[in-house]
Image (spheres, rainbow, N blue to C red):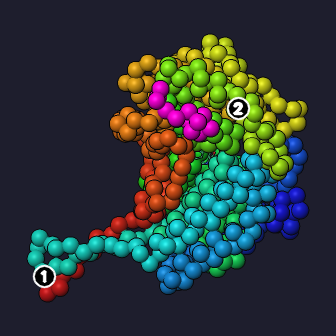
Amino acid sequence: MKLNEQDEATATAATLLIDGAWREAASGQTFASLNPADERVIGHVSAGDARDVDAAVAAARAAFEERRWLSLPPPQRARILHAVADRIEMELDTLAENEVRENGMPLTMARATIGGGAQAFRYFAGWIGKIHGQTGEMAQGEQYFGYTLKEPVGVAALIVPWNGPFMMACHKLAPALAAGCTTVLKPAEDTSLNTLNLVRIVLDAGVPAGVVNLVTGLGSVAGAALVAHPDVDKVSFTGSTPVGRQIVQAAAGNFKRVTLELGGKSPVIVLDDADLALAVPAVLNGIMANSGQACVAGSRLYAQRGIYDRLIAAVAEAAGKLVIGDGLSAGTQMGPVISAKQFERVMGYIEGGVAEGAELVSGGKRRGETGFFIEPTIFSHAPHDATVMREEIFGPVLSATPFDDLGWAIAQANDTRYGLAGAVYTRSLEKAHTVARAVRAGNLWINCYSVQDFSLPFGGYKESGWGRERGAMGLEAFMENKSVVARLY
Ligand code: NAD
């Protein structure tokens, strides 16, 4: 389904999928979804509420108890997840264009993220049939036989943000299904429509009805009902730290298992001996990719004094050359931010940065009159306590400061409530690994930025989250461990 060419589902705003059937929300209410590049309506989304969440959770619970998914032999389940990946790849052109219309990212990035969604299904399909418990020698002797079983945690609520909507839904759905869970997916308000395509693909590939359910709606209504629901066993959430905190409280009712991938204010340290030809584009892309709307965005730059001026000048020059526009236009390197609300928020931070004494060396203004475009913005000599140095902006804003002593830079890097990511650029092996050890964050890059792989766990320290996605840990997050002891004689 191509956005703007509404098929039956979106034409009627039947954007909820419950027990294999598309339906409208019980409230009968809808809200519009906009293209952030031209502010035109691309479709309507049903505003689900607690009644729809009850129905979706009941469907997921029934599918789980009836073992509709888990009773399929492992090779069949793996084949189905591979079929999901095949179908995503077959529809990649349309899915990527939809992602651009909904989120605003450049088409090249959308194609990469949709491809990343397919990879998630392939990677986790490979785990099915390879999920093992353990046996151990018991102190009680051979009269007893003890072993462990890994079992799906049950009904999993999967809550996704707007900044990589299709891919992040895949990153949650694939491990949840590989673990044997049944699910209720809740996309973000601004980017719900392409998720309908994902869910359609999952059904067409052979995932039984009720195993994947979709509830669209407002986070404060549908999302809140889902995370508080007593029949949900697990919440996997990617989004902002304040909402993560609310989810922890809501989940306490029945002690849901909770995985949180939250915000960040990731430090980038560039040493005097760095290869600037490599560092300049990496630093720029590390913050400006997806218009800065990336949880791992390298938004704080600490550069050693010997190269500071050259680095800032080169990054600012490259930022000025970035082609800004509609993600579907050829050559676009940076699209708009997601919404009017986000636009106002980011512009507010930029004004605050100037007011708090950071030196604006590039950008800082709106681009055009239609669409939510913001110039790539660079602040130099940003005071350590300036808001632009401390808070997650989630926009194309880099705040830099020089340093002399690496120990000082590491201390500044760690002086944050976040701990999602960081990077160091240097030719010194010793310094690279010293920084990698010292920075308290879940992901650390050396001479590159945001290079990620399914084999590596992804997640944050401190207020950047709980738990890890991807890799074996990502699968474990959707499983319980059961110890079984049998008396043999
Ligand atoms: P958000 O927290 O506002 O919303 C995320 C999702 O949660 C949406 O689907 C929303 O509808 C839902 N939601 C909102 N309130 C809820 C509630 N009370 N209960 C349950 N669900 C609720 O975040 P956002 O603005 O959509 O996304 C941006 C944030 O996400 C940034 O802070 C960013 O750093 C973070 N993020 C983190 C990662 C990561 O992996 N660590 C990845 C991407 C984005």
Q: Is residue 81 above or below residue 414?
A: below
Q: Is residue 326 above or below residue 54?
A: above
- Helix, strand or loop status at disc 1: loop
- Helix, strand or loop status at disc 2: helix
**Based on the displayed image, in which of its 4 quarters is residue 426 positioned?**
top left
Q: Which mark is residue 143?
A: 1
Asked if the residue at tag 1 contacts the one at tag 2, i.e. Cβ–Cβ closer than 8 Å, the answer is: no
Asked if residue 350 lies left or right of residue 431, the reply is: right
Amino acid type at mark 1: Gln
Amino acid type at mark 2: Ala
Percent across and percent down for residue 234 are: 49, 58
Please name the predominant secondary structure of the magenta segment in the image: helix
- Mark 2 or 1, closer to the camera: 2
- Magenta segment range? 271-283
- Marks 2/1: CA distance? 70 Å
Asked if residue 394 lies left or right of residue 483, the reply is: right
Q: Which mark is residue 319?
A: 2
- CB at mark 1 closer than 8 A to ligand 1? no
User: Which residue does the image show at 66% across and 37% down from the upper left?
Assistant: 288
Q: Is residue 107 above or below residue 313?
A: below
Tell me the quarter of the image containing the N terminus. bottom right
**Observer-nearest of 314 and 114:** 314
Q: Residues within 10 Å of mark 2 (few under 14, many from 20)?
A: many
Tell me if residue 236 can be seen: yes
User: Which residue does the image show at 58% across and 42% down from the upper left?
Assistant: 295
User: Which residue does the image show at 58% across and 68% down from the upper left?
Assistant: 121
**Membership of 272 in magenta stretch:** yes
Percent across and percent down for residue 483 are: 28, 70
Outermost residue toward the bottom in this view: 489
Tell me if residue 388 can be seen: no
Tell me the quarter of the image containing the C terminus. bottom left
Asked if residue 272 lies left or right of residue 83, the reply is: left
